[in-house]
């Protein structure tokens, strides 16, 4: 089974390494030199060079150059694990078996952008790792493999990402043999049960202390590394926040946003329904007690 691999993030790197360890015949890799869109960007070229795999730097996977390069490799299947743009039918139709993509949600639910971030922001307690055959629409193709995973209160973006990768690698070990011998099955998605999450913007990462404490906690852990971090605006500047702690504050006769206490670099702020401690952050100067954020 001849495979062309497409990817440009940490997940791509880990899955490519797994495929190589399984002796999958990777005949070419399409990747990027850099990416401003992907905070978890990873360089796949060292792995390609070590394993003597041809590679092509790609800006537009749907370009004539990309298509010609992939076609010359005569792949039986294309794996697209970690790519931020849709593949057009001119790419989807190159390989006889099609293109296997990946989406970390319980498809058909939660198609679209930033699935791990939105899952944590919304306080979901579980999601899924899904490999599917891509079609012209986003995340709507037939499912090849889907395995659930839990999201605990203590989890942040980094731990959820790590757990997702672990689940995905175990799935790859199971579905590679059935792809190779042609015994795989496809599960059609029911689009009536689907929804599409939108693209985030900078305002979605702003901590507004009129929110309740749990919402701020979820937002902060969702945007922890490898992502860009939540942020607080203070003195006309924006400062990243990486970790907060929910605090029970029974005194509701205090306006949201008031700084209640400081302890070294940790400071406590009143929220709508309680308070949070801002534990890990990039503030240059700690706000004073009595100030408002």
Image: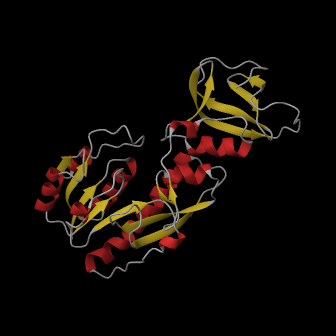
Query: Is any atom of residue 53 visible in this view?
Result: no
Instruction: From the viewer's side, name the closer residue of 44 and 49.
Output: 44
Rendered view: 149 above or below 180: above
Find residue 180 and report its image quarter: bottom left
Q: Give the residue displayed 29% in from the left and 62% down from the top.
A: 79
Question: Whole-percent x and y of residue 98?
Answer: 26, 69
**In this view, which residue lies farthest toward the bottom?**
183
Rendered view: 293 above or below 97: above
Find residue 208 and report its image quarter: top right
Could you tell whether 43 is left or right of 167 in the image? Answer: left
Q: Give the residue displayed 33% in from the left and 55% down from the top.
A: 86
Could you tell whether 240 is left or right of 64 in the image? Answer: right
**In this view, which residue lies farthest toward the left?**
72
Q: Give the residue displayed 70% in from the left and 27% down from the top.
A: 266
Question: Whole-percent x and y of residue 188?
Answer: 42, 77
Question: Whole-percent x and y of residue 88?
Answer: 27, 59
Query: Is any atom of residue 271 visible in this view?
Result: yes
């Amino acid at each position: 089974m001849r495979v062309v691999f497409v990817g440009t993030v940490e997940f791509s790197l880990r899955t490519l390494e797994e495929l190589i360890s399984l002796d999958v015949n990777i005949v070419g890799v399409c990747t990027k030199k850099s990416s401003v869109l992907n905070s978890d960007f990873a360089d796949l070229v060292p792995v390609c060079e070590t394993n003597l795999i041809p590679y092509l730097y790609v800006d537009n996977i749907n370009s004539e150059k990309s298509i010609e390069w992939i076609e010359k490799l005569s792949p039986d299947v294309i794996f697209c694990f970690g790519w931020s743009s849709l593949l057009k039918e001119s790419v989807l139709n190159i390989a006889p078996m099609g293109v296997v993509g990946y989406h970390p949600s319980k498809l058909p639910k939660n198609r679209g952008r930033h699935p791990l971030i939105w899952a944590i922001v919304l306080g979901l307690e579980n999601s899924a790792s899904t490999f599917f055959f891509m079609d012209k629409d986003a995340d709507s193709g037939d499912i090849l493999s889907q395995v659930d995973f839990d999201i605990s209160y203590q989890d942040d973006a980094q731990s959820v990402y790590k757990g997702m990768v672990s689940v995905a690698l175990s799935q790859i070990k199971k579905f590679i043999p059935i792809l190779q011998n042609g015994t795989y099955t496809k599960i059609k998605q029911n689009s009536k049960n689907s929804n599409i999450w939108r693209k985030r913007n900078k305002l979605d990462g702003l901590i507004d202390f009129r929110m309740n404490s749990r919402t701020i906690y979820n937002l902060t852990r969702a945007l922890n590394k490898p992502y860009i971090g939540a942020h607080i605006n203070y003195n006309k500047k924006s400062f990243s926040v990486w970790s907060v702690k929910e605090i029970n504050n029974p005194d509701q006769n205090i306006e949201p946003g008031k700084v209640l206490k400081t302890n070294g670099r940790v400071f406590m702020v009143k929220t709508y329904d309680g308070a949070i401690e801002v534990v890990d952050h990039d503030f240059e100067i700690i706000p004073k007690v009595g100030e408002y954020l």
